[in-house]
Image (cartoon, rainbow, N blue to C red):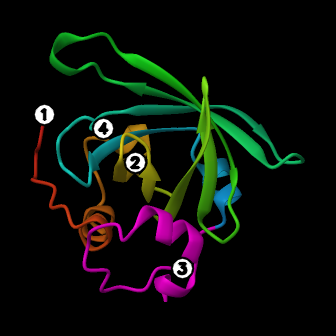
Amino acid sequence: SFLCIGNTVLAKLGAPGGPLKKHYDFPDVFEVVSEYKDAMSISDSDNDTIFDCLLTNRTEVDYEARTFKYVWTIQGADGSPKEEVLMTGMPGPTSGSVRFFVEGDPTMRDALIYYSDKSCSIMDVEYHGHQCILWVKRNLKDTVPQVCIDNFMDICGVVIKPGRRD
């Protein structure tokens, strides 16, 4: 049960927002990192579009030191310029948990990967508050698999409208 895993991370992040009717086995963080060199966020838990179409690119992975770096490119709101954020991460204390910090801010933050397959990942992230995010591989951005949409609803509690283009 998800309540027994990652208690410290879950306590800090809180529940992700969905009904969590399904059982999820938290994935190995480095398997997810290996699978996802780049991805795009499709939706976040508050459905405010701030993180919609956020791009992420893995710039570095060190399997020996067990660290990795991603650059998030956040689309500017209302015509403002894009923002690039460098994140350095490492596996957290339990399966699926990630510890990370943002360049220029030494505060350690947490994330929890609830679901991941070859097409999508769903994670709860401590960034700009609390965000539960659906990531897909970029080549799937226009054809998000239904299993990803269904699991995002179950985990994050957000319904993605078909053909949504914010």
As drawn, the label of residue 166 is 1
**Where does label 4 land, which residue?**
51
User: In the visual, does 98 lie left or right of 73?
Assistant: right
- Dot in front, 1 or 2: 1
Element assignment for label 1: loop
Assess whether residue 17 is covered by the magenta stretch. yes
**Dominant SS in magenta:** loop
Q: x%, y% of residue 150?
A: 25, 69
Taking the spot 61% from the left edge, 56% from the top edge, the residue there is 98
**Where does label 2 land, which residue?**
136
Q: Compute the Cα span from label 1 to label 3.
A: 32 Å
User: In the visual, does 24 lie left or right of 18?
Assistant: right
Which mark is first along the chain, 3 or 4?
Answer: 3
Residue 56 seen in the current view: yes
At label 2, counting other C-alpha atoms closer than 10 Å, the crowd grade (few under 14, some 14-19, many 20 or more) is many
Please determine whether, in this image, residue 143 is positioned above or below residue 104. Answer: below
